[in-house]
Amino acid sequence: MVSKVFFTNMRTKPGNNLLDKLGKVIEKAGIGNMDLRDKMVALKIHFGEPGNLAYIRPNYIALIVNKIKELGGKPFLTDCNTLYYGRRSNAVDHLEAAMENGFNRIAVNCDVIIADGLTGTDAKEIEINQKHVKLAKIGAVIADADVIISINHFKGHEQTGFGGAMKNLGMGCGSRKGKLEMHSASKPKMDQEKCVSCGICIKNCPEKAITYNEKRQAQINYEKCIGCGQCVASCHYGAARAVYDQAADILNEKISEYTLAVLRDKQHFHINFMMNISPDCDCWNVNDQAIVPDVGIAASTDPVALDRACVDLVNAAPEIVGSIIGDKGELQGGADKFVHVHPDVHWKDGLNHAEEIGVGTQEYQLITVK
């Protein structure tokens, strides 16, 4: 089976700017064929860690929002809280970060809802019984939505090789406990040398699994610990930390399984923006020089085909001199840029597994829209 991926490049002319081209691409890809009347439509997006400027411009989001409203849908922007401590690790800070980066009702014509609640514990378990994951822990708001549309900044990623639709859906829709399950085979650890005895982790642990030792340093009782990650999110000093001990191939496969859970029984649609193609994730508060020039926008109803097409398009593009690729030396023609930047990560593991479990196919037909 071959999936269709619709693509437009960055060339414009009067009367056909990039917003016009985005509208044409999503229309050709079939957004107008979706039944959105009175449906709750979750627009899954990464708002960008403040300081990072590679995230998708709100102008594009506004066009998508308005299109969904024209079709009778009830759109909202959404993301889940992060596992690590930062500007998006709780709903209050997350909403402020989104506002700061331009994702607000004035700019995009809809509201933002953080999918897993105030501190990342508002989740629903979706039974999938796959190789690694039996019960996926998905942000409750996303689980309850009728439709999900992923809007993805396509870029490199230090743990998965690249980040696109699959990463945004699988990892991005996981609650804090879900993210911990994907990242790690173990529970959080406590670096007691960094503990300042503030007691915040003790206060926020839902299972009362954290206490002080005789030196008044926080310690975890693993017989009580459920691996929710609340201590990681609440610690301001880096003492409580997730242990990223999951091999990259397993992490990629778990993300594919979480994507399966997110999309189950939902209408879905996916858009990748191949712009500001930075070597690493938008979760950093910086973005390094793009590795290739802006490529364009692609859309599909199949996230696997979409991501594979975008990998191929980026790999076909010339590298930017002065980027991390340029710093490492010239690539041979056709070389895999993502493997070059992150040599210990093999992005094919995720797409291969996604194809095996029925999320989509890597066989695609690329259709150019002018």
Image (cartoon, rainbow, N blue to C red):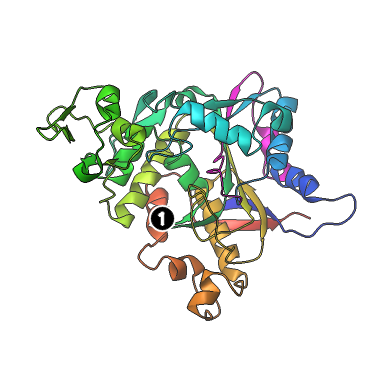
Query: The disc labelled 1 sits on which kind of residue?
Result: Thr
What residue does disc 1 label?
A: 160
Q: Is residue 185 left or right of residue 340?
A: left
Q: Residue at x 16, y 30 (%)?
A: 212
Specify the farthest residue to the right: 14
Disc 1 on helix, strand or loop?
loop
Image quadrant for the C terminus?
bottom right
Q: Residues within 10 Å of mark 1 (few under 14, many from 20)?
A: many
Q: Residue at x 64, y 51 (%)?
A: 298
Q: Position of residue 152 (x, y in %)?
A: 57, 46
Q: Position of residue 337 (x, y in %)?
A: 50, 69
Q: Examine the image and state in which quarter residue 61 appears.
A: top right
> In the image, is residue 150 above or below residue 350?
above
Does any portion of residue 183 appear in the rendered image? yes
Q: Residue at x 37, y 62 (%)?
A: 345
Read off the magenta span.
27-53
Q: Examine the image and state in which quarter residue 213 appears.
A: top left
Specify the farthest residue to the top: 38
Q: Position of residue 312 (x, y in %)?
A: 56, 64
Q: Is residue 264 left or right of residue 268?
A: left
> In the image, is residue 205 above or below residue 333?
above
Q: Position of residue 79 (x, y in %)?
A: 51, 34
Magenta highlight on residue 327: no
Camera-nearest residue between 72 and 51: 51
Task: Report the number of numbered marks.
Answer: 1
In terms of secondary structure, what is the magenta stretch mainly?
loop
Magenta highlight on residue 41: yes
Does any portion of residue 1 appear in the rendered image? no
